[in-house]
Image: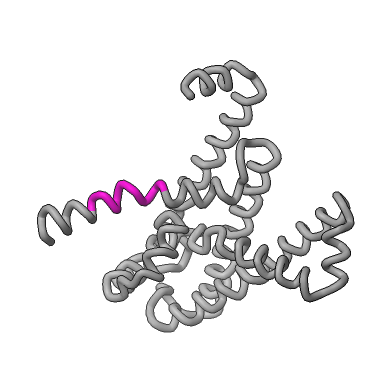
Amino acid sequence: MLETFRRAFQTKDIRRKLGYTFLMLIVIRLGSQLPTPGVDPTYIKEFFAQNSGEAFNLFNAFTGGSFEQMSILALSITPYITSSIIIQLLTIAIPALEEMHRDGEEGRKKMTAITRYVTVGLALFESVAMAVGFGRQGLLTTFNAVNVIVVVAALTAGSAFLMWVGEQINDKGVGNGISMVLLINILSRIPQDMVTLYETFVKGK
């Protein structure tokens, strides 16, 4: 196995792809630390402290802690995953999409474009629901139209950016881009999870 890795790094093209993938993953983690403008970060932390259910913890793991910090990447890649599932299901139900799916490379490009549009639509819907729903309860520093628009724009752009990063990794990097985004987010939570386990089971907090 080590010999395989050594040979892989000796190939210039593979080194370039690995370097590009690594760079994109660093960009993702940096973006996860950028706060969303107009948001009170303490609100989500207090919300998580009061609602420590499995669903919230799982979603936070998928976002690499971005949701808990309410960064610009808080929605993560979940709108894209949901969009892909919806399009695949609709392909079975709608003949036009099924025909497009069978139309080779040209059809694949059209399906990809439709998935992108649906992703942006879902991200927009989720960010509006979050900004309005949580905003009334204290998520926004000041609940007004300007702050709502800023938060919606930031969260939607963040999700669209991750979708773009995933596609760039597909084209210029190594592995499936969306899977790599999810992987780095989940791995980034391991140190904090280990600390939590230590404090819970060893220190008994």
Q: Residue at x 71, y 61 (%)?
A: 116
Q: In the image shown, does 184 or 107 lie closer to the viewer?
A: 107
- The percent coordinates of residue 20 (x first, y second) are 60, 33
Q: In the image shown, does 18 or 1 lie closer to the viewer?
A: 1
Q: How many marks?
A: 0
Which contiguous range is marked in magenta?
187-195
Q: Residue at x 37, y 65 (%)?
A: 57
- The percent coordinates of residue 191 (x first, y second) are 30, 46
Q: Residue at x 71, y 66 (%)?
A: 88
Q: Relative to 95, is 199 on the left or the right?
A: left
Residue 26, above or below 59: above
Among all residues in the image, which is located at the extreme left? 203
Residue 12, above or below 158: above
Q: In the image shown, does 106 or 45 lie closer to the viewer?
A: 106
Q: In the image shown, does 130 or 177 lie closer to the viewer?
A: 177
Tell me which secondary structure the magenta stretch mostly adopts: helix
> Is 205 covered by the magenta stretch?
no
Q: State the image quarter where residue 126 is shown.
A: bottom right
Q: State the image quarter where residue 19 is shown.
A: top right
Q: Residue at x 23, y 55 (%)?
A: 196
- The percent coordinates of residue 201 (x first, y second) are 15, 56
Q: Relative to 172, is 136 on the left or the right?
A: left
> Is 191 covered by the magenta stretch?
yes
Quarter of the image with the C terminus is bottom left
Residue 25, above or below 90: above
- The percent coordinates of residue 25 (x first, y second) are 52, 42
Query: What colour scheme governs how the chains and residues are painted in the rendered image of this protein?
Result: one colour
Q: Relative to 196, is 75 on the left or the right?
A: right
